[in-house]
Amino acid sequence: MKKTINLLTLLILSSTMEFAFADYDLLVKNNCLACHYIDKRKYGPKLNEVAAKYVNESNAAEILAKKIKSGGSGVWGEDMMPPQPQLSDADALILAKYILLLK
């Protein structure tokens, strides 16, 4: 029984890590890291700052996904984020959910 529980735990953790790596790969694939780092400021805000900003929003993932696709300025100072229309709605939502986990 104990071996079964350990095996199930291992499977759950490994599948979760695989999704986390896949989401990080989506950041890389879409060149998000050209302007954003997770915990250091580059051109845009730190991704963990973005997550902290939306922590109390009930529909944070949808709001952030929309901002990712449409771009914008003025939220984080004078920096401007260009729109990312090449992203599918599904990928924008995956990125938003991943970013929100970084708080």
Image (spheres, rainbow, N blue to C red):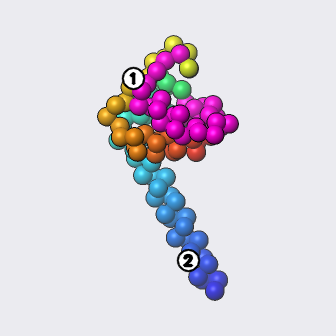
Between residue 101 and residue 54, name the one nearer to us. Answer: 54
Is 58 magenta? The answer is yes
| Residue 39 visible | no
Q: Residue at x 46, y 58 (%)?
A: 18
| 1 shown above or below 75 | below
Q: Residue furthest right?
A: 56
Give residue 74's position: percent from left, percent from top. 53, 16
Q: Residue at x 68, y 36 (%)?
A: 56
Q: Which mark is residue 18?
A: none
- For the N terminus, the quadrant is bottom right
Q: Amino acid at mark 1?
A: Pro
- Does dot 2 land on a helix, a strand or a loop? helix
Give residue 82's position: percent from left, percent from top. 39, 23
Is 73 magenta? The answer is yes
- Does dot 1 land on a helix, a strand or a loop? loop
Q: Quadrant of residue 46?
A: top right
1 or 2: tag closer to the N-terminus: 2
Q: Residue furthest top?
A: 78
- For the C terminus, the quadrant is top right
Q: Amino acid at mark 2?
A: Leu
Q: In screen coordinates, is 62 left or right of 87?
A: right
Q: Main secondary structure of the magenta part?
A: helix
Q: Residue at x 37, y 35 (%)?
A: 31
Q: Residue furthest left?
A: 86
| C-alpha gap between disc 1 and disc 2 | 45 Å
Q: Which mark is residue 7?
A: 2
Give residue 95's position: percent from left, percent from top. 46, 42
Q: Residue at x 40, y 45 (%)?
A: 90
CB contact under 8 Å: marks 1 and 2 = no
Mark 1 or mark 2, which is nearer to you?
A: 1
Q: Which mark is residue 82?
A: 1
Boundaries of the magenta span: 46-74
